[in-house]
Amino acid sequence: MVRVCRNLWPAVMLWACASSPEHADTPRACTRIGCESGLGIRVEGATGPVRIELDAGEGAETRETECAPDGPCVAFFPGRTPESATVRVVAGPRVVTRELRPEYERVQPNGPGCPPVCRQATVVVALPGD
């Protein structure tokens, strides 16, 4: 039993030192990577130009953006973090409207304890085939 206790002593001391209040104020090296809160929308199944319209409700101005016809269609609406929203996707003759309830994640690109802290979500809207 004494041998086991003697072998555990370094681990106990390491834990005690790491969790002591005097180490809580240790300076942290934070980088300067920025982030912005907002809602991302990815459209799947689109060919040709695509227009995405976001209505965040509650008197917010409807925002819209267009995706180029030759690449993936991903849009980010900075500063928009609604609990619910309506998105309308127009791709040629196809129009899809979806009610969204985004699930936001807390994003800290510089690590825990370092600013900035942002809220971001990405939702996928799939267009039906022709």
Image: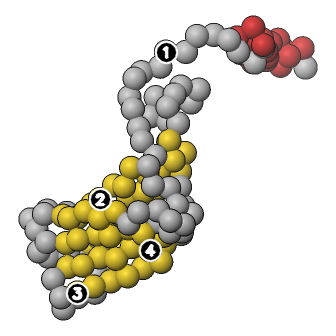
Of all residues shown, which one is farthest toward the front? 59
Q: Which mark is in front, 1 or 2?
A: 2
The answer to whether residue 43 is left or right of residue 121 is left
The answer to whether residue 60 is left or right of residue 50 is right
Badge 3 local density, few (<14 within 10 Å), some, or many (20+)? Answer: few
Badge 2 local density, few (<14 within 10 Å), some, or many (20+)? Answer: some
For label 4, the residue is 86
Badge 1 local density, few (<14 within 10 Å), some, or many (20+)? Answer: few
Q: Label 1 vs label 2: CA separation?
A: 32 Å
For label 3, the residue is 94
Coordinates of residue 17 in the picture (x, y in percent): 75, 11
Please, what secondary structure does the residue beneath circle 4 have?
strand
Which numbered circle lies on residue 75?
2
The answer to whether residue 44 is left or right of residue 29 is left
Q: Which mark is in front, 1 or 4?
A: 4
Is any atom of residue 80 visible in this view? yes
79 relative to 8, above or below: below
Residue at 52 percent across and 36 percent down: it is 117
Residue type at tag 3: Arg
